[in-house]
Image (cartoon, rainbow, N blue to C red):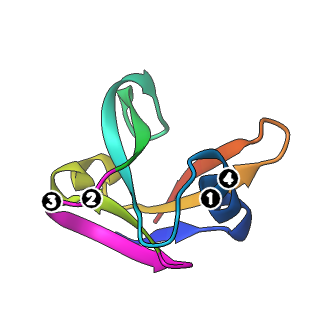
Amino acid sequence: MNIHISEDAIEWFKNEMLADEGEFIRFYVRYGGSSPLHDSFSLGVSKEEPIEAGSMINIDNRTFFIEERDLWYFDGHDLHVGYNKELEEPLYEYKK
């Protein structure tokens, strides 16, 4: 399970979440909402340090990660984070 993040999405995290160099951004499973992979679950994002990272990537000295306990949600898919210019927010896609 890998994480891929577009340059536009990186800029969004820097500007909107104020993700400074050396900080951690976590993608996590939350109850509620919906996704192409699971009903009643969706992807959340927060700034926090990892406990037991199952997947991580460092881009522009910022670390993006998913905890080991949340990997079930991806069901063998990679997470691709793009940017929706119309909505001005990240776009999450799941690809095998």
Q: Which mark is residue 51?
A: 3
What is the span of residues highlighted in magenta in the rendered image?
48-61
| The quarter of the displayed image where residue 53 is located | bottom left
Q: From the viewer's side, name the closer residue of 16 and 10.
A: 16
Helix, strand or loop at mark 1: helix
Q: Is residue 68 left or right of residue 46?
A: left
Helix, strand or loop at mark 3: loop
CA gap, disc 4 to disc 1?
4 Å
Helix, strand or loop at mark 4: helix
Residue pictured at 66% horizontal, 68% vertical: 6
The disc, 3 or 4, on the residue closer to the chain's N-terminal end is: 4
- Characterize the local packing of mark 2: few (<14), some (14-19) or many (20 or more) Cα atoms within 10 angstroms: some
- Characterize the local packing of mark 4: few (<14), some (14-19) or many (20 or more) Cα atoms within 10 angstroms: few
Tag 1 residue: 14
Tag 2 residue: 49
Mark 3 vs mark 1, foreground winner is 1
Residue pictured at 30% horizontal, 46% vertical: 73
